[in-house]
Image (spheres, coloured by chain):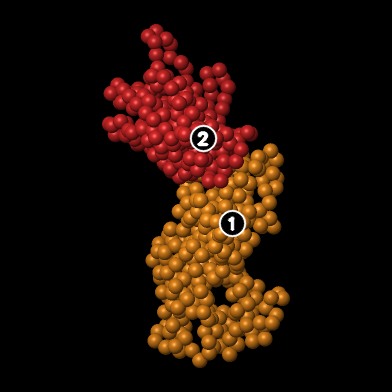
Amino acid sequence: MRDLRTFHYAVVRVVPDLDRDEAVNIGLVVLADDGSFADARFADLSRVRRTSPRADLRPIALFEDAVRESLPVARHQIRLERARTELSIEQLTDWSREFGGVVRVTTPRVMLGESGAALTDRLYDDLIAPRRSERQHRTRVFTRGDLVEELDNEVRSWNISDELVGRGRHVRGRRADHLVDRTFQRPDHSLAAIVQAISFEASDLADIYGARAALIVASEDLRDDATAPLSAYAIYADAPTERAEVVRESASLFNVKKIVPVDHRDLAPLRQELSGLLIPDARSTAGSH
Amino acid sequence: MAAGTPPKPLDEIIGDLGPASSGGASLTQRVLVRRPDGSEYKAHAKFTVDNAGAGIVEYSPWGAVAELVSSGLARAIAAPACDYVVVLLPEGVDIRLRGDRQPAPGLAVAAQTILDAVDAIDGMLQGVDPADLARIGMLHALTQVGDHGGANNHIRAGDPPRIYSVDHASAFQAEHSGGTGPATLNLSALLAPVLSATPALLRTASAELAALTDTTIADIIASVPRQFLPTDEARDRLRSALSQRRDALPGVVAAQFPEEK
């Protein structure tokens, strides 16, 4: 069984020229909710020089060192010498509110994951890494509709028969009909998987609870009635850190109910799993598209 | 001010450069300021009331009083700190604070922006003169500023690097509430490790407080506009509190960090 945990992350940004107010993402801090993991990764500061050739990089480098030194654990490893001031989620939040100088910290956000290291790698690649430097950290809220649209765009690239994909379709379980965002059928038309979108940053908590309940109830009822294994996925968008409680609770429920959370920014694992279900001999070639 | 002396013309805010950070309690704004001689500088400004009559700076207008008095004290004891002065926001200069609030025209306070500053956290004191830190410790003790307990509200800038104490809008809370605050040494988390390890610096800095004369204190209080601090009673209370703390702090430091024999 997957062991989902909640992680908080914040992006470290440099604003070399306050007048231009252009920010360069230079680092990422990830802290596990339960204190078992902490990591800080920073990019080569030369990218700051590209924006502002005369920028003084020394205090920025000092800031990076100070953050690394203040991590409560070094990734998963307990530190031999505890930091005098240990970095916490509250402190990151405080920094995000207070910092007004060259170095800024974004408001921490919360995510689900099994491995802090893997999550850090992915977030770093998505938000900080040079080859993605043209990407801006998004500022708008992702709705359930956005997430479903992203899934549909992804599915179109899977090259599977359109008739195997159900969109907003009612499916009959043992006890009730269920309306889920997307269903995936095997070639023999047995139900292989259901997918529901959950935006943990939805303005109304009821939207989160509603989508989550629909998925849990549907997965239980459909599995009771299924003759073949049924996978259930929650495609989610991460959330501001004040939503940690609902994310943590969801992680716990998903663990128990065997629902797989999928970060909307990385749908490749979903493709691998689903292609194996929908096209029996596809698993070996899933990664070669 | 002596009778018959013409009022000194104030620096004037002439442009809006946007909110200073993600949203401090004082809604600090970056502005462009013009001196009477025509030269200009960028500054961080705090305003007391908006055009609807609501307070803007923390504890308005006391936050502005606290910034002006703290800056005057910092100048007097050579503690590196943001340097607020009284400025004028003229009619017709459009300033948009976070939340689309607009400050009312009139007096405000502004400190010249310290360029290329990075908010200082634990571990960022390399290369900094520790005597500066001791003077900042004395400034915090004189002002009894309330939110410098953590590492925040210190910035690092310059070459050679200096640490500056910033945001003193929460200072003098005891005097704000009608009392006279104590003389306590409240070293921030950023300063405490260095200064605790080098108490001689604190003793020296506390001895240097003797240079903060009653006349200097009176001049600092007198520089605060009546609009911000209208009553003589409140002015006297601040003067008295500062004199008492100045006199008491060397003893407080000596008791807390006695000289080794």
Chain letter for red?
A: B
Instruction: Using residue B195 as the reference point, say whether residue B217 is left or right of it.
Output: left
- Callout 2 touching callout 1 (CB < 8 Å): no
Element under disc 1? strand
Q: Is residue A137 above or below residue A268?
A: above
Kindly identify the amino acid type of the residue bearing the numbered disc 2: Leu
Name the residue at 56% across, 88% down. Answer: A189
Q: Position of residue A127 (x, y in %)?
A: 61, 57
To which chain does the residue with label 2 belong?
Answer: B
Mark nearer the viewer, 2 or 1: 2
Q: Is residue B118 visible?
A: no
**In the orientation shown, which residue stands out farthest toward the front?**
B261
Q: Using the rendered view, name the quadrant where residue B42 is placed.
A: top right
**Residue A228: x, y in percent?**
53, 89
Find disc 1 in the rendering and name its residue: A40
Mark 1: amino acid: Ala
Q: Is residue A204 left or right of residue A239?
A: left
**What residue is drawn where x is 37% and y is 35%?**
B184
The tint of chain A in the picture is: orange
Q: Answer yes or no: is residue A132 visible.
A: yes
Q: Which mark is residue B133?
A: 2
Which chain's residue wears label 1? A
Dot 2 alpha-carbon crowd within 10 angstroms: few under 14, some 14 to 19, many 20 or more = many
